[in-house]
Amino acid sequence: MKKLKMGIMALAFIFVLSACGGSKSKLETVTYGLKNNGVTLQLEMKYDKDKTIQETTANNTYVYKDMNRTKEDLKKSIDTNSTMYKDMKGVKRDVSYGDTEAKETIHVVVKDVSKEDLKTLYGNNFDDKDNLSLDKLVKTFEKLGYTKK
């Protein structure tokens, strides 16, 4: 009897877990990148079935020597440009400065970012429902020279 109760509880637990997980929509991922003069930029975009972007992660690498810049010079430049991210809710930015290169990661959770801040980050790449559009953003990045990875 005790084993039967445990078995029923285990099945109920599995059912609850699968029901919770089943309601979550699956996100697809696409990555675009650009490499030029010591700078490697990579943007990963997670989107839903309607091609509405839900999250983005930019992974950027800056090689000082290939950019003809010193670590200190590049740090000053990156830190100056990073002020735009400072108070943006839903945006997390990390930068590390190594001996030969700097690495920057910018993670954006779209639903947590104000529409005004999204337009600052991504321009007017929104669909007719005012959602951040994968198709429009991809076209913008392709015009800038990014290619699909």
Image (tube, rainbow, N blue to C red):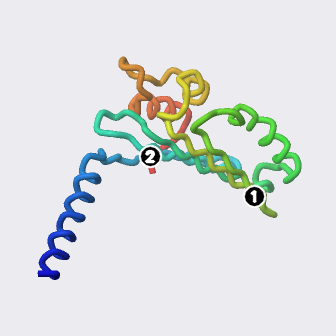
The amino acid sitting under disc 1 is: Glu
Q: Residues within 10 Å of mark 2 (few under 14, many from 20)?
A: some
Give the percent coordinates (x, y) of residue 63.
74, 55
Please tell me which residue is depicted at 82% across the width and 47% down the height of the picture: 75
Mark toward the viewer: 2 or 1 = 1
Quick check: marks 2 and 1 in contact, CB under 8 Å? no
Viewed as shown, does residue 147 lie left or right of 65? left
Q: Position of residue 98 (x, y in %)?
A: 78, 62
Chain-order first, disc 2 or disc 1: 1
Camera-side residue of 99 and 92: 92
Task: Name the residue located 82 percent from the left edge and 46 percent from the top edge.
Answer: 74
Residue 88 at x, y percent in the picture = 64, 33
**How many marks do you count on the picture?**
2
Q: Residue furthest front?
A: 1
Q: Which residue is mark 2?
A: 148
Q: Nearer the viewer, residue 6 or 98?
A: 6
- The residue drawn where x is 49% and y is 45% is 32
Q: What residue does disc 1 label?
A: 101
- Name the residue at 56% across, 23% down: 119
Q: Secondary structure at mark 2?
A: strand
